[in-house]
Amino acid sequence: MKFPDNFLWGGAIASAQAEGAFDADGRGLSVYDLMPCGKNRVQSFLNGEYKEKNLIYPNRQGIDFYHRYKEDIKLLAEMGFKAFRFSISWSRIFPKGIEEKPNEAGLKFYENVIDECLKYKIEPVITILHYDIPLYLVEKYNGFESRELVDLFERYAITLFERFHDKVHYWMTINEINIMRYSPLDAGIKDSGKNELQTIFQAAHHQFLASAKAVIAHNRICKNSKIGMMLGYEPAYPKTCHPDDILLAEKSENELLFFSDVMVLGYYPETMKHYFKNHQIEIHMEKGDEDILKKGKVDYMALSYYSSAVCSSDPDDQKNVKRGNIIYGIDNPYLTTTDWGWTIDSKGLQISLLRLYHRYHKPLFIVECGIGMHETKKEDMIEDNYRIEYFKEHLIQVQEAMDLGVEVMGFLAWSPMDMPSAASGEQEKRYGFIYVDANNQLQGSYDRSPKKSFYWYQKVIQTKGECLTDNN
Ligand code: BGP
């Protein structure tokens, strides 16, 4: 077992979760700065609790990557990273999202981060938007429900391309674009209106356009890079071989893939148009939109993979339906879960790669995959054997998919350093190869220390995966 020499080994973070320094150097507020720690963080924001309550806001502090990026990137280099994915905070570049001119201090910060990566020959992989929409755009426009955001996003993307085109080889437009189906606020939608699906899919149309316009601009400005879309993927399994279960899983699968269909194929598939009709959704399109979507097709497809989901048509199961990372389903009796109840399913990753490759025939880039667990540092080093096991099993499945001919560009673990969870803001949901000394109350030194998995991943990268099949 050996991965190709150009395989992009590495890890991924996001601006809102890592950077902190929420009001430094002219940065404007983003919606994540006002979400407290806890499962109800979105509702708390929507209720405006931040206006009257003094709660804990983890994203304001992140893990202080803004000031510690040199130390962090040095550790990533020590692990042998070939690629490091991070996102740009829109409100660091355009504090309200509407300014004519960008904030130079924001651009300079990312230039420094990029240069630090390049110093160690690490490819910076940039996500243009990873959930943290400037607050102003949420308050004034209801996020991407408004068409205004299409051009604002395009301007933001162009600013990045013009500044970094000679240093960056991999871009992606919008993180987990499909998550807005269940978390509208990630598309900046504060008010879903009377017909929630109408609002969501109109906003999706605007995100498709924004992304396609960014792709078109990228292809004009950047001569040496590729640009992708990014899907949060969870394969849907039928609970039984009863055709009702299979049909349900099939429908769930197709609804999830609507998002990548448009961005990879460049048009709305017929089935999606019928879905709109059947759900009284009317997408307002302008002349030329279809042409933009066609011209703005992506070069590759990036995906996050954490778990799979089970669909059941049995009415008795409906009370047990819960949400994993992306979609809803019931427990899988054949699989175990993380401390947060997410199904651990390494074969699901191979299934995902096969499904997506057969549907789109585009190179796939796994840009998030990982396991969030409780960990307390009592001794010198955290012995996170479950994480080693998790990655080992998942990487073997990647290799098997590649043996079947699937093009996989790389594997980026979520997340190299512990950092607050996107969903709940808990710092104590730990994913890292590197422990960060901070708790849910934001107490701690924030010092970094490698876990056992740090040295294991280092060896995997060094041996190009050959050590995965070692028995010791
Ligand atoms: C993905 C997001 C990431 C990340 C990850 C884990 O959906 O793109 O930002 O956070 O999920 O989720 P969580 O942090 O909530 O455990």
Image: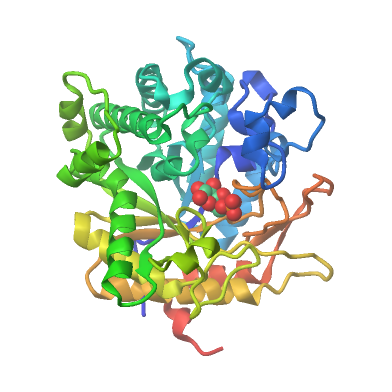
| Spot occupied by residue 360 in the image (x, y as percentages of width and height) | 21, 54
Q: Nearer the viewer, residue 259 or 441?
A: 259
Q: Is residue 383 above or below residue 185?
A: below
Give the quadrant of residue 272.
top left
274 and 80: which is toward the camera? 274
Horizontally, residue 27 falls left or right of residue 166, namely: right
Instruction: Tell me if I can see residue 3 in this picture.
Output: no
Instruction: Assign the C terminus to one quadrant of the image.
Output: bottom right
Work out whether residue 374 or residue 77 is closer to the camera in this orientation and state it. Answer: 374
Kindly identify the residue that appears in the image at 33 percent across and 63 percent down.
249
Q: Quadrant of the N terminus?
A: bottom left
The percent position of residue 34, horizontal first and vertical second, equals 67, 30
Q: Quadrant of residue 273?
A: top left
Q: Is residue 99 above or below residue 206?
A: above
Residue 357's spot in the image, x, y percent?
A: 24, 61
The colouring scheme, among rainbow, by chain, secondary structure or one colour, is rainbow
Which residue is pictured at 78% across the width and 54% down the height? 437
